[in-house]
Image: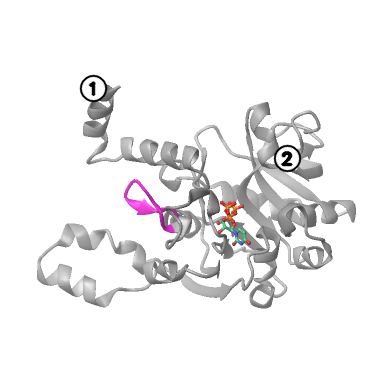
Amino acid sequence: MKINIAVVPVAGLGTRLLPATKSQPKEMLPVGRKPVVQYVVEELARVGMQRILFITGPGKASIENHFDLNAELIQVLRENGKEDLLAELSFERAPIQYFYTRQRQQLGLGHAVSCAEPFIGNQPFAVALGDSIIGLNAESDILSRMTKCFVERKAEAVIAFMEVSQDRVPYYGVAKPREDSEYFELEDVIEKPSADEAPSNLVIAARYVFAPGIFEALGQIQPGSGGEYQLTDAIRLIIQGGGKVYGVRLRADERRYDVGNFDSYFQAFVEFALADEKCGDSLREYLKNML
Ligand code: UTP
């Protein structure tokens, strides 16, 4: 079985990044040279995804424009002999088909994923959050490992997890693993528990693989805090119904760069800029002198 279709939710309001996100999507904020969502798409292309469905919302048209072919720009660069700049647009020719649907009300990530149902139908698929990069320059094959686990273990869902310090746990969906191994079965998964109640410090890290049964579970959940439909609650229902759900750990070199708040956005930008082939060294010197 090949999983080659991915859903990328990008409809969130991004209120934690105001005013930067008042009239532009957080998924289009640059990290180093590229907008966040371009790294996400490059990661998906590298692991063999062929169709990407974006779940978009108000004010997100620039994401669609970014993945279109811009013939006029290509012509201007070609006429002016700017081959190096033309190379920067090579992502436009990735062998991927793009699709878009709107989440008409921002009712949370679970609701966003449920908007994909008419498109996905009865096949397994990946979900990659459009505001999170996995690994420096998105060099991660986490989704390949997850789809392997999904197929080998006949799973209903596979989720990427990362370790965080105990004080960070209340901000995430947290695993209750049955065993301690690279792929581990989940006994439960809990959305934003208090630090005392958290069953581990393994937290959900922005990538999922689902069997189509997730849609039925999403149809059964009630809105949680803030009136949002939580994807974690639907995963929990699957586990409670006897479905096998597994976690796969990110490796130490596969940090999750979450662009959803300023702290981690600034860190991601600086780390990517320092790793930049052309500008990294001079930025490092500049920062050394400044600090
Ligand atoms: P977040 O959980 O960070 O929510 O979304 P948000 O609404 O974008 O941000 P804040 O809390 O207002 O700052 C994680 C991912 O899920 C998408 C977002 O676009 C982001 O890529 N999302 C979230 C949706 O597509 N729809 C939603 O209703 C919520």
| Amino acid of disc 1 | Asn
Q: Which span of residues is magenta-colored?
A: 28-37
Q: Amino acid at mark 2?
A: Val
Image-based side of 84 in relation to 166, left or right = left
Q: Nearer the viewer, mark 1 or mark 2?
A: 1
Q: Is mark 2 within 8 Å of ligand 1?
A: no
Q: Residue at (40%, 45%) from the top-left corner?
A: 137
**Extreme residue in the right direction:** 241
Q: Quadrant of ligand 1?
A: bottom right
Q: Is residue 77 magenta?
A: no
User: Residue 147: image x %, image y %?
Assistant: 64, 54
Q: Residue 271, position in %: x, y?
A: 38, 36
Q: Nearer the viewer, residue 131 or 145?
A: 131
Q: Tell me the SS state at disc 1.
A: helix
* Residue 124 visible in the shown view: no
Judge left or right: residue 177 versus residue 61: right
- Which residue is disc 2 drawn over? 174
Measuring from the top left, give residue 253's x and y in whole percent: 50, 34
| Residue named by callout 1 | 289
* Label 2 crowd (10 A; few <14 / some 14-19 / many >=20): many
| Residue at 45% in and 59% down | 22
Q: How is the image coloured?
A: one colour
* Residue shown at 53% from the left, 63% from the top: 49
Q: Nearer the viewer, residue 180 or 273?
A: 273
Of the numbered discs 1 and 2, the one sitting upstream in the chain is 2
User: Would you say residue 34 sits in the magenta stretch?
Assistant: yes
In the displayed structure, 31 sits above or below 45; it is: above
For image coordinates 84% across by 51% down, the residue present is 239
Q: In the image, which disc is placed on residue 226? A: none
